[in-house]
Amino acid sequence: MSLLTEKPAGWNRPALIAPSGDGELLEVAMGPHHPSTHGVFRMDVALDGERVVRLRPVFGYLHRNHEKIAEGQSYLASMPFTDRLDYICPMTNNWAYALAVEKLVGQEVPERAEYLRVIVGELTRFQNHASSIGFLIQEMGASGTPLMYAFREREKILDLFEELTGARMMVNYMRFGGCRVDASVAWLEKTRKVVAGLGGFVDEFERLLATNEILMVRTQGVGVLSAELAVNAGVTGPMLRASGVNYDIRKVDAYGIYNRFKFRVPLGDHGDVYDRFMIRLLEMRESIVILEQALKDIPAGPVMSATAKIRGFRPKPGEAYGRIEAPKGELGFYLISDGGPNPYRYRVRPPSLINLTVLEDMCLGHDVADVVLIFGSVDIVLGEVDR
Amino acid sequence: MKTVEEIKSVIEAAIPGAAVEIVPNPGPSGQHSLRIAPSHALAVAKFLRDDEELKLDYLSNVTGVDWPDALEAVYHLYSVEKKHGPVVIRLRTGNRTDQVELPSLTPIWRSAEFQEREIFDLYGIVFTGHPDLRRLLMWEEFKDHPMRRDYVAPDDFEYEPTAHDEVLKRAEAHKAAMAGKLAEAST
């Protein structure tokens, strides 16, 4: 079905922008292999000159039915699989899944493990936001430099993950009722050193980018998302807060031990690409604040709960939905147990997919070069979109 | 935050005839849910979104579930304004074969748009009133619903509805010809 001939879709869609009538519309498939799509993703756009009058995202190139695979194996066997959802942030994926299963069975988590989860979770948020900004600037045409600055910091954090878990990205770190391995004194010391250096990096990054004229011209007033639409379309994470909606699950649910830390939730005014970029920058600063508190207060003790069951893990019949504030938005796992060793239903609520609901609304009327920027500012990973 | 019993009674007071049934959750999470008759689902959803006290303006998650006798769509609702939730509502189809229609809640919460498409794709629930009900993850020509529990995976995962068969045949012919040549060379 061609974008050019099909009827404009129904009610809650933005009005199809009227073509100017100066020439014919052109249908362009951006992707699936396109350097700006962060993976294999296709946007079919109808163009009137340079202006986008219709956009349709096409998914599924990376679909492997993660949920079906998880229904066919034990609860624990899905833990390493969650690393592969949003492969930039495996730690938070682990955390969301562990949280949902802990809700399902009513499992407590020891203090030290909660602190370790916060530390690795906030490090993950930091490196995700840094590389997401780096990619955004890269797509704007600043080849290399900002992205390499971001990756330099990311490398330090991945080195920490490697030392802690044995893997840089596919960490498989959390368990139902704690964490797989304890952090050594030396690791904590090294982490403190890395965290002490992150502030300087954010300063440098901000000086380099925030008042850069080209960046401001390209991003301010581009891809505006209103607060009402953002809430109605289920947009979460930095994108929602850039539209000025104060909703951070770390504050709302206070899962884990987040109520012990003092941190602020940055909010945007305009909901454009620039605000999304700034929110990520500010959230990186707040992550440092949380990290400093967590690294100061972390107590000694076990990292696995003594009541945690590893072998013969069979939750009683019931269901649970657990969610966390992942770097990209609300990452949730919904599990239904029928008493067996495998979940009866295992559902991932992917923030990347649902944040794309408003992609067309944000892009209509903008130039095709801006589509790349608007899409980049959503911050998605295809491993999670297609599952 | 109201309990499910209270929510059930306010729904029934506001929408006469809405059959709301509490589905208790025996597990420790304590997330009980409300089963709503599909005929009243749209009205109930609108009420839940707009009611001053509940204000469930944010639909977080839509899940398809395949039960032995019916298909089910589970909606997890939160309130961004009041910062409470989740309220879980469930819609059930008549059976798994010919009565698989449910009303779409996309007109109320747009976050259901892709998620209902995904359920249509993977479970085969037909959401009436959805503006753009197409497959989301599988390709358009695909016939079955892979998340159903009785789905039989193909013998040949290489199969794709493209010129693939022809390509394989050519490959076989090429292999046979090569084998003949090799045999010739060794004699």
Image (tube, coloured by chain):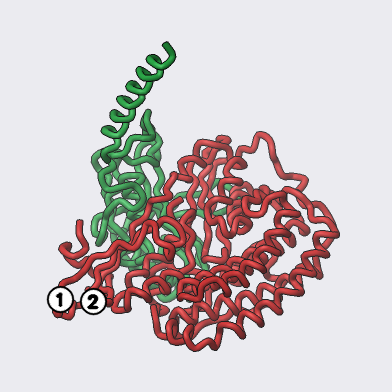
Chain colours: A red, B green
Q: Which mark is residue A323?
A: none
Mark 2 and mark 1 residues within 8 Å of each other at the beta carbon: yes
**Crowd class of label 2 (few under 14; some 14 to 19; many from 20; radius 10 Å):** some
Q: In the drawing, does residue A181 fall left or right of residue B21?
A: right
Q: Which mark is residue A23?
A: 1
Q: How many marks on residues? A: 2
Give, as a three-letter code, the residue at label 2. Gly
Judging depth in this view, the residue of A134 and B60 nearest the camera is A134
Q: Which residue is drawn at 65% across and 81% down?
A: A204
Name the spot of residue A148 as percent of width and height, x first.
60, 69
Judging depth in this view, the residue of B16 and A88 nearest the camera is A88
Name the spot of residue B76 as percent of width and height, x first.
45, 59
Give, as a three-letter code, the residue at label 1. Gly
- Above or below, B34 against B48 in this view is above
Query: What's the CA distance linking mark 2 and mark 1?
Result: 8 Å
Q: What element carries label 2?
A: loop
- Above or below, A181 against A342 in this view is below
Name the spot of residue A76 as percent of width and height, x first.
62, 42
Q: In the drawing, does residue B158 fall left or right of residue A94?
A: left
**Crowd class of label 1 (few under 14; some 14 to 19; many from 20; radius 10 Å):** few
* Residue A154 in view (yes/no): yes
Q: Which residue is drawn at 57% across and 63% down?
A: A326
| Residue highlighted by disc 2 | A49
